[in-house]
Amino acid sequence: MARRIQFSAHGGPEVLEYVDYTPAEPGPQQVRVRNKAIGLNFIDTYYRSGLYAPPALPSGLGAEGAGVVDAVGSEVTQFKVGDRVAYGSGPLGAYSELHVLPAANLVHLPDAISFEQAAGAMLKGLTVQYLLRQTYELKGGETILFHAAAGGVGSLACQWAKALGVKLIGTVSSPEKAALAKSLGAWETIDYSHENVPQRVLELTDGKKCPVVYDGVGKDTWLASLDSVAPRGLLVSFGNASGAVDGVNLGILAAKGSLYVTRPTLATYANNPQNLQAMADDLFAMIESGKVRIDINQRYSLAEAAKAQVELSGRRTTGSTILLP
């Protein structure tokens, strides 16, 4: 027997249950991981609330963690029992002591990276990797806008952008978060609680706006993001923290300067084991070099998952949050 968090109905954090369950034996191409640390992410709340549909109910939750291989399927050759591993994408069920998932979803974890660092970095770090290195390949010298710069993804993006020689303008909601983003490498910050984001972007870029804007907030920032993109620039909409963007009129892209928009997901970029490991190696190299620091600013026991989600949704967390089984 082992323990895990599951939910049998959609709703608020109160639907999360801490239960005993019997972990499955790994199938031929699967691996069972004994989690040492588990990552907490906004996407977890989307599955819990019903914005995203889990395969079935009751469902496990969470898609990010790090630990040690506990058992391997008959056809798995790239991992063995005792290997240090990490993962940042499905299937759901990471909020558990033991998690069975496809070998293709795992990466080898170097000794220099701790389980806590990996659990706090895989999903957010791989997201930043594809955003800054693939969706729009930053060369250095650009001035970009990144929303929620003090959050989990944003705090890594601030550091990575600075390492690339990029001027990152980060939006924040308080002076404390502005100071944090600046300390992590943001070039400038805009406090959207009382500043006009597009107007400040115009001032900071001498009227040029940004060649790329990264928006993980969604509905609340959609128009401000469009108004901050330079003509023929790219708006990267990669999250829904404030709700999904809907009812988009394509004509607005023409009116605002022949803009491009993309809605990327990690799964499309890390679409095979080779790409996934290469992206993870890039992330791990940035962490090992010290250019990207993983700040685990909140730790909760696995049993406290509901409390952790309340804090995350209430925007009362900074950096990474992890659950400890």
Image (spheres, rainbow, N blue to C red):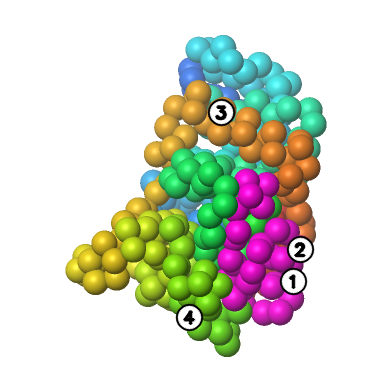
Q: Are marks 3 and 4 in contact (CB under 8 Å)?
A: no
Asked whether residue 180 is drawn in magenta, I would say yes
**Amino acid type assigned to the residue bearing label 3 in the image:** Ala
Disc on res. 183: 2
Extreme bottom residue here? Answer: 194
Dot 4 corresponds to which residue? Answer: 199
Element under label 2?
A: helix
**Horizontal side of residue 321 vs 244, given as left or right:** right
Measuring 79% from the left and 31% from the top, which residue is drawn there? 112
Mark with earlier residue (1, 3): 1
Measuring 53% from the left and 55% from the top, which residue is drawn there? 142
Disc on res. 278: 3
Picture quadrant where residue 284 is located: top right
Point out the image quarter for the N terminus.
top right
Chain part drawn in magenta: 162-190
Q: Is residue 242 above or below residue 52?
A: below
Distance between the alpha carbons at the discs numbered 4 and 2: 24 Å
Extreme front residue here? Answer: 206
Mark with earlier residue (4, 2): 2
Is residue 227 in view from this perspective?
yes
Specify few, some or many for label 1: CA neighbours under 10 Å numbering under 14, 14-19, or 20 or more: some
Element under label 4?
A: helix
**Amino acid type assigned to the residue bearing label 1 in the image:** Ala
Q: Are marks 2 and 1 in contact (CB under 8 Å)?
A: yes
Q: Nearer the viewer, mark 4 or mark 2?
A: 4
Distance between the alpha carbons at the discs numbered 4 and 1: 21 Å
**Amino acid type assigned to the residue bearing label 2 in the image:** Ser
**Horizontal side of residue 168 vs 233, given as left or right:** right
Disc on res. 179: 1
Picture quadrant where residue 158 is located: bottom right
